[in-house]
Every structure is written in C-alpha cells, then in structure tokens.
Image: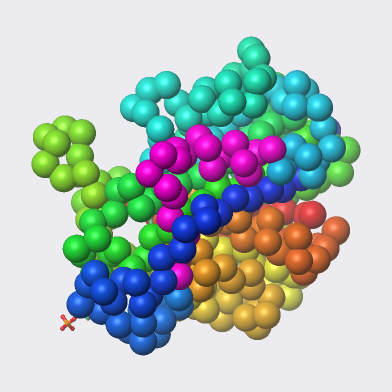
Amino acid sequence: MSFSKIIGTGSYLPEKILTNHDLEKLLDTSDEWITTRTGIKQRHIIDKDQKTSDMAYEAAIKAINAAKIDKNTIDLIIVATTTPDKVFPSTACTLQNKLEIDGCPAFDVQAVCSGFIYGLSIADKYIKTRSARTVLLVGVDAMSTITDYTDRGNAILWGDGAGAVVLSNSHEPGILSTHIHAQGKYEDMLHVPRKIDQSKDTIEMVGNQVFKIAVKTLDKIVDETLEANNLRKSDIDWLVPHQANIRILEATAKKLSLSMDKVIVTIDRHGNTSAASIPLALDEGIQASKILPDQLVLMEAFGGGFTWGSALIRI
Ligand code: ACO
C-alpha cells in the first residue's frame, strides 16, 4: 500500500502590514472591537504590482527546498485559491511556468477557506492511487483584492499570504484521512456576486450567521475525523485550524478538550488569509519546532459554499 506524506512546508507573507489602528482611520471601528470579536491585530497586504502567483511562487520555493527535492520530480501542481491572477489560465499553470517546470498537470481548486483541505484530499488520492509520486500543493489568497474597505463587518477580517507543502509517496501513512463536504444552499451567505452581472466584486457575508453554522459544523467534523480513525480526543497533539476568528478556534479546541497552547494561532498577525491560512499555520508550527516528527495533527476549515473539511496527518 502506498501512502502520502508531507515532506516539506513553506510560506510567504507580503511586507506591507495593515493594523487595526490603520483601519480605525478608514472605518467606524476600534482596535478594541476587532481584537475582542475576532482576535485579529494586523494582517499582511500585497503590493499593487504583486499577484497571487508571486506569493504562491515564494511559498513553493521554500517548501521545495525544505523537502530537499529536485523541482523537476514534481508530477502534479495544485493551487487552492479564490483570487486567481486571471479568469484563466489557472494560477497553478502560471506557477508552473514561474517554477520553470514543464509538462506535469497543474490545476486550481476553488473551495474558498476550505481550499487547502480540498487540495490535500485530492493530492492524497493521486499519490495513493499511484497517479503521482510528488505533489506540490499551495494555498494562496490575496483577499485584500476582493475586500470592500467601506464594510466594517468584513474588511477587518481579511489578509493576504501563501503556504505550500510538498507531498510524496511513503511506506508509512502521513495523511491518515481527509474529509470534505459542501452545502451549496448557503451560497448567498458568503460570496462575491461578481462575474455574472459585474454589479459587485467584493465579499458579502452574513457574518454572525456564518459564525454560528461554522462552529456547529466544525464540531461535527471533529467527531467524524476521530471516529474514522478510531481515535480519542487525547490522541491529538496539535490543532492547526483555518484562522477565521479566534472565538471559532477556541470553540473547536474546547470540543477537543485541547488547551489553547496546543492550537497553532496566527490569526492575530495574519487575519483570515482564506486558503493560505492552514499551510501558513502549519509551516509556522513546524519552523518554531512546536509541531514535531511523529506527532498527530488535526487540520480543519470552514468557508464559502459553504464548504468544510478536515485532515488528520502524522508529521
Ligand atoms: N467595528 C465595530 N462594530 C462593528 C464592526 C466593526 N468592525 N462590525 C460589526 N459591528 C457591529 C455591528 O454593526 C453590530 O452592531 P449592532 O448590534 O448595533 O447592530 C454589532 O457590531 C454586532 O455585529 P455582529 O455581526 O453580530 O458581530 P459578531 O460578533 O458576529 O462579529 C464577525 C462579526 C467578526 C464577522 C463574526 O461574525 C465572524 O467572524 N463571522 C465568521 C466569519 C467566518 O468564519 N467566515 C467563514 C470563513 S471565511 C471564507 O470562507 C471566505
């Protein structure tokens, strides 16, 4: 039996930082409100001449170096993003070109904040079915490019960044299981209406309702993941959650009876970077030598669609 395993991680954050105090000058809000309700203090924002694929490239190079592989051995590139450079081609194709790799399949996955988990699920299955041996998976988003900076219930949340992993075939299980779901009936609760009528090209969200559904849904996916692997809550070493709101993270940690020092938290510095948030947090946890080899990591996400998912991995 062939398994897949993460053999390298990398991440990238743009230099420019937008603090809560900067937002106080633009909106009727306060650092105190944002901090208390979301846990966010600042977020990174791309430059005008920077693109999603530029961030993806920076994170990918670091992951490839960490994995110590020849980039030409990559036989599949997946990019999870909601903010592609262009309508087409995919950002994965643009990234392939920037990496000077030729011929391997490359495509984007669109599942908003759950995109990295969706991508991981696909990468795992390609490797397990021996359709690929080495996969580059990037979660990247430039959420600032689709944010309405006059909408205080929304603009405070989003940040830009990229995280990447290299997965390889392995004799021992790295990805133990992935679980992905969607419920399209909630389309209008969190969406960008653009494209069809050109009327609006920024995020609209019924934040407080999304919040409640997210907490309930993440509760269920934690149970689903533990049951699928015959594990108890106490077996989990680390929670690496999608970073949407500190209160959502705390609710999931409580469900797992995990103390917050077993949760990788980046939301205070990154905001919600959508598909990038989990691989950014994973890389940070590994670089800081918090997450160690052989440990069991639960990753989960909830986002527009609605989509949600989880992955249980052994490092
Ligand atoms: N500053 C000050 N006051 C504000 C702000 C702000 N930035 N934003 C909203 N308020 C006010 C509202 O107007 C409202 O005032 P009112 O009581 O006078 O009507 C009050 O604060 C409460 O508003 P709520 O929207 O109920 O506030 P809530 O505590 O729910 O926080 C938030 C809003 C932060 C958006 C929260 O609901 C949230 O995080 N939602 C979930 C987001 C999420 O998980 N999304 C999914 C993933 S993202 C993706 O897939 C792309």
Name which residue lies at 51% across and 25% down: 94
Q: Nearer the viewer, residue 300 or 43?
A: 43
| Residue 191 in view (yes/no) | no
- Extreme right residue here? 171
Q: Quadrant of the N terminus?
A: top right
Name which residue lies at 77% across and 23% down: 73
Compared with residue 79, is residue 290 higher up or lower down, i.e. above or below? below
- The x and y percentages for residue 126 are 66, 28
Left or right of residue 166, residue 78 in this image: left
- Extreme top residue here? 103
Left or right of residue 269, residue 297 in this image: right
Q: Nearer the viewer, residue 141 or 133?
A: 141
- The x and y percentages for residue 75 are 70, 22
Q: Nearer the viewer, residue 226 or 274?
A: 274
Residue 39 lies in quadrant: bottom left
Could you tell me how many numbered marks the image carries?
0
Is 57 inside the magenta-drawn segment?
A: yes
Q: Nearer the viewer, residue 150 or 168?
A: 150
Compared with residue 143, is residue 223 higher up or lower down, i.e. above or below? below
> On the rendering, which quadrant does ligand 1 occupy?
bottom left
Residue 244 lies in quadrant: bottom left
- The x and y percentages for residue 191 are 26, 49
Left or right of residue 7, residue 79 in this image: left
Q: Quadrant of the C terminus?
A: bottom right
Is 301 inside the magenta-drawn segment?
A: no
Segment tinted magenta in the rendering: 42-61
- The x and y percentages for residue 269 are 52, 69
Name which residue lies at 78% across and 55% down: 314
